[in-house]
Amino acid sequence: MSKLNIGIILGSTRQGRLSPQVGEWVLQVANQRGDANYEIVDIADFKLPLLGEADATEQATAWNTKLASLDGFVFIVQEYNHSISASLKNALDYARDAWNNKAAGIVSYGSVGGARAAEHLRGILGELSVADVRIHPALSLFTDFENGTVFIPADLHLVNLNGMLDQVNAWSGALKTLRS
């Protein structure tokens, strides 16, 4: 069986966002495992306007094509007002079938580890027929980010990150059989 393709989705588009640092950490750890093909997928690169406000055929096609090429996902989610960012919700809404029957893990961050955003995302993923895995690295803005800007994860997060990646790969492989 060929290696699975797992997208690490950066869930924010704002200036000064921290998700690229977290995404690079996940990518570095994941690539050391050698068990799948991992890549960062930055929703900012797709320039998706608010759903329904403009003709976004080109952007939506590119977004859906990218998602369709992936077998599973790791969402990098930051908490905004106890939920996910508007840009991530918008990107989730721009696709339907491309999400179906795939697995996802969540790496969240915020003042309480981004736990409330992760829980909101789980509900949305369920509606999109994405199986989210249980293990969830939750990063603190107070202890894992120096001065709130430089990501320096505590070593203890490696256990959860690797456990989450184990689950994403197992579920992605199993769900791929439904899409074949």
Image (cartoon, helix red, strand yellow):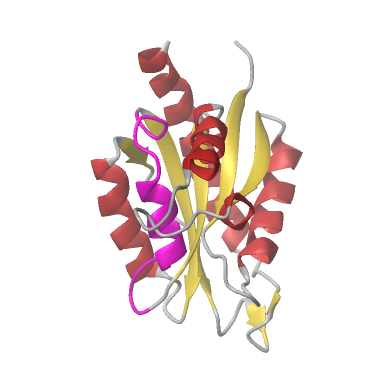
Determine which quarter of the picture holds residue 5: top right
Counting from the top left corner in percent of width and height, residue 15 is at 63, 75
- The one of 118 and 170 positioned closer to us in this rendering: 118
In this picture, residue 180 sits left or right of residue 166: left
Numbered-mark total: 0
Is residue 87 a member of the stretch shown in magenta? Answer: yes
Q: Is residue 22 visible?
A: yes
In this picture, residue 42 sits left or right of residue 24: left
Specify the quadrant that holds the N terminus. Answer: top right
Counting from the top left corner in percent of width and height, residue 23 is at 64, 56
Which residue is at 42% across, 54% downward?
A: 54
- The one of 141 and 96 positioned closer to us in this rendering: 96
Specify the quadrant that holds the C terminus. Answer: top left
For the magenta stretch, what is the residue range?
81-100
Looking at the image, the residue that sits furthest to the front is 55
- The one of 131 and 94 positioned closer to us in this rendering: 94
Looking at the image, the residue that sits furthest to the bottom is 147
Determine which quarter of the picture holds residue 133: top left
In this picture, residue 103 sits left or right of residue 70: left
Decide whether the magenta segment is chiefly helix, strand or loop: loop
Which residue is at 35% across, 48% downward?
A: 93
Counting from the top left corner in percent of width and height, residue 25 is at 70, 57
Q: Is residue 135 visible?
A: no
Which residue is at 70% across, 73% downward?
A: 152
Which residue is at 67% across, 89% downward?
A: 147
Where 66 falls versus 16 (above or below)? above
Is residue 176 a member of the stretch shown in magenta? Answer: no
Counting from the top left corner in percent of width and height, residue 12 is at 53, 65
Where 176 falls versus 153 (above or below)? above
